[in-house]
Image (cartoon, helix red, strand yellow):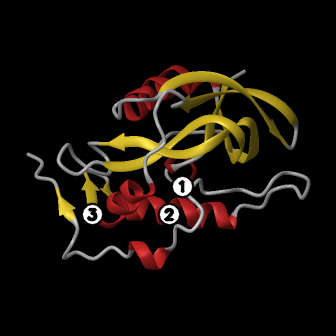
Amino acid sequence: MGVFVFGYGSLMWNPGFRHGGASPALLEGWRRAWCVRSTYYRGCERMPGLVLGLKRGGSCVGLLFEIPEEFASETLGALDEREMREHGYLRQTLSVLHAAGAAEAIAYTSEKLPDPHEDDIANAYRRARGFAGATSEYVERTREFIRGMAVPAHWPAAHDGLPPGFSDSETRSTDAYAYHCNRR
C-alpha cells in the first residue's frame, strides 16, 4: 500500500509528483493560514512573499493524493525538499476524512509561526515575486482552485484563509510596484 499526502495550497493545483489519484479531503482541527514567509518561491529576503501553512484550529478542505508504494520514497523526498525549502514547515502525519472514510496523510504544518498582520499580506500580494512567480499568482490560483472544489454538503465550506475584508481591489498587483528579486 502507498502513502497519502494532504494538499491545501499549491500542492492542489501544482502537485509536481506522480500519484494514483486525488480526491477532496477534510482536515479537522487545522486551518489554512498565510503564515509562511517565502524567500525563494514567492519572494526573496528583501521582499518576502507569503504562502500557506496549516495551523491548529478550525478545519481545512483540501486534496488527498494517493502515492503508489513504488513512488513513495522518491516522492516524499522530493516533497520534503520542495516544502522544507521555505523555513517553518513541519512534516506530520494527520488523520483526514474523504469519501472512502478516514486516512492517515502526510501534511506540512506550520503551527509555530505567527499569523502575519493584514498589511503584510497585502504588501506581499502587491509586491513579492520569487523563483516560482508572484505571491499574487499563488493567492489567486489557490483561491480559484478552492472555489471550484466540489465537496460533500455536510462538510464545512472551503476557506482560503485570507483575513475578513481582504479584497482583490485593495491588493491589485501591477508590474510597476512588483519587487523582482535578482537570482543568479
Q: CA distance from mark 2 to mark 3?
A: 17 Å
Residue type at mark 2 is Arg
Q: Secondary structure at mark 3?
A: helix
Residue beneath the point at 76% across and 42% down: 26
Q: Disc 3 designates what residue?
A: 127
Q: Quadrant of the C terminus?
A: top left
Q: Position of residue 25 (x, y in %)?
A: 75, 43
Q: Is residue 55 left or right of residue 100?
A: left
Q: Residues within 10 Å of mark 1 (few under 14, many from 20)?
A: some
Residue type at mark 1 is Trp
Q: Quadrant of the N terminus?
A: top right
Q: Disc 1 designates what residue?
A: 13
State yes or no: discs 2 and 1 in contact (Cβ < 8 Å). Answer: yes
Residue type at mark 3 is Arg
Q: Nearer the viewer, residue 58 or 107?
A: 58
Residue beneath the point at 49% across and 27% down: 112
Q: Disc 2 designates what residue?
A: 141
Q: Could you tell which of marks 2 and 3 lies nearer the N-terminus?
A: 3
Q: Is residue 120 left or right of residue 144?
A: left
Q: CA distance from mark 1 to mark 3?
A: 22 Å
Q: Could you tell which of marks 2 and 1 lies nearer the N-terminus?
A: 1
Residue beneath the point at 50% across and 40% down: 17
